[in-house]
Image (cartoon, rainbow, N blue to C red):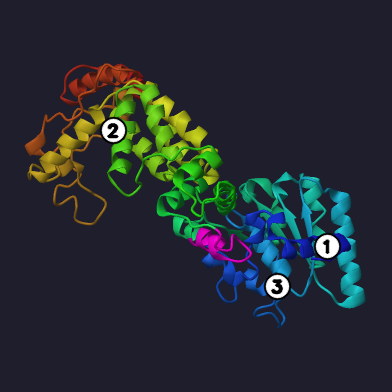
Amino acid sequence: MEPDLFTAAAEERQEKDPGSSPLAVRMRPRTLDEVVGQQHLLRPGAPLRRLVGEGAGGPAGPASVLLWGPPGTGKTTLAYVVSQATQKRFVELSAITAGVKEVRAVIEGARRAAGGYGKETVLFLDEIHRFSKAQQDSLLPAVENRWVTLIAATTENPYFSVISPLLSRSLLLTLEPLTDDDVRGLLHRAVAAERGLGGAVTLPEDSEEHLLRIAGGDARRALTALEAAAGAALAQGEAEVSLPTLEAAVDRAAVAYDRDGDQHYDVASALIKSVRGSDVDAALHYLARMIEAGEDPRFIARRLMISASEDIGLADSSALQTAVAAAQAVAMIGFPEAALTLAHATVALALAPKSNAVTKAVGAAMDDVRAGRAGPVPAHLRDGHYKGAEKLGHAQGYVYPHDVPGAIAAQQYAPDALAGRRYYEPTRYGAEARYAEVVERVRERLAGGGQDGPGRGDERN
């Protein structure tokens, strides 16, 4: 990073008085080896290591990169490490405050540095998704001609927020959410390190677990909460960050919830049973408990998807669509915004009409199969596309449903042992009432009774 008098003075002040900077800033890694998590991006020969000069040389230079990941996963940290470790000229811009004028100034400075001093420039652009198309276009010549090596960071899907020409000229590196063990290791380091808290306080296990729940995989949030709690403890003359002190400091009560024990399953069970029972308020309570306890949002989304088929089924087929969409959205956005999506799905499922007819139908069919009630596939339904099938009688006598009025052919589909066996018994709840009327007419027609006029089959669509 290009030094100036103010930056140098600020760094000198930080060395003399560590408390003048936030703990999250002081604990930023200074080398790639200190980075927590993201090991898939830090292997030997990886793009970020080439940016700091490791394995550089030869005809292939380092590539520009787009860092995509949720907040607190280390995008800015990785750029900071590159700025400290690289021998290149490092310039930082934020898309929140910078515009085309600032970008052009950086590019012009990079061309002068390259031409006059042979110095390469690395440009870190934070929040690139906030740049308009025209602003992103202004980066293209510099990236394409490698006047600058770009490191751009975004929390939004770059396939939607970054223009295609810039995306194709860069390597997309996806940062994964930090695990609890990643954040735990960072907390231990912050408590002990001289540039952190220097061992001034200790962190008992219950407080550590609460910090992990608060963090939700966000390293910056974990360190900010730790610093607040440590400050409160020291102000009270305590050498330990107790759970009550931590709760008061961050204004967030610890939820009694063991993500690996009985409470994990008990609360999840209560959520689904509340949805099944159409008690939307109780369902939202249990959802809130899971969210506040730091439950994996993907686990919650999976349970809701299961409930959509198990408890609602054809009474409201859109429930499954809502649950699946929620799961996809949760995977893309993460907490805290994912709480809104999960609540959306929870309310929709709790208030939807309920039917377990599909659940019972497939269960009964599977019971028959397990009990050995199967039998051979009727000859007219067997595959007739191979040589010799006709001699075996396969596919002979099959009636193509689209050739008959109503598109329902009166023929046997089930094996002989299960002819006439009924599995699906629809309810009269919600949209399934319509299916109940249709299924009776269809079964009667399949058995050879009744006549649908032209177009009557459309009612089943």
The kind of residue tagged 1 is Ala
Q: Give x and y (percent) for residue 134.
A: 81, 46
Please, what secondary structure does the residue beneath circle 1 have? helix
Magenta-colored span = 185-200
Residue sitting nearer the eye, 126 or 240: 240
Please, what secondary structure does the residue beneath circle 2 have? helix
The kind of residue tagged 2 is Glu
Q: Residue at x 28, y 26 (%)?
A: 404
Q: Real-space Cα distance between discs 2 and 3?
A: 55 Å
Work out whether mark 1 precedes mark 2 in sequence or the reverse, and give the earlier one.
1
In this image, 306 relative to 412: left or right? right
Work out whether mark 2 precedes mark 3 in sequence or the reverse, and give the earlier one.
3
Q: Residue at x 25, y 19 (%)?
A: 436
Residue sitting nearer the eye, 109 or 447: 109
Q: Give x and y (percent) for residue 405.
A: 30, 23
Q: Can residue 252 be spotted in the picture? A: yes
Please, what secondary structure does the residue beneath circle 3 have? helix
Residue sitting nearer the eye, 199 or 4: 199
Work out whether mark 1 precedes mark 3 in sequence or the reverse, and give the earlier one.
1
Residue 249, compared with residue 67, is above or below; it is above
Task: Estimate how packed mark 2 is, as few (under 14), some (14 to 19) or many (20 or more) residues with alpha carbons within 10 Å.
Answer: some
Quadrant containing the N terminus is bottom right
Q: Which residue is labeled 2 in the image? A: 310
- Look at discs 1 and 2 and give the one toward the viewer: 1
In this image, 153 relative to 88: left or right? left
Rendered image quadrant of residue 352: top left
Q: Give x and y (percent) for residue 191.
A: 54, 60
Q: Which residue is labeled 3 in the image? A: 85
- Look at discs 2 and 3 and give the one toward the viewer: 3
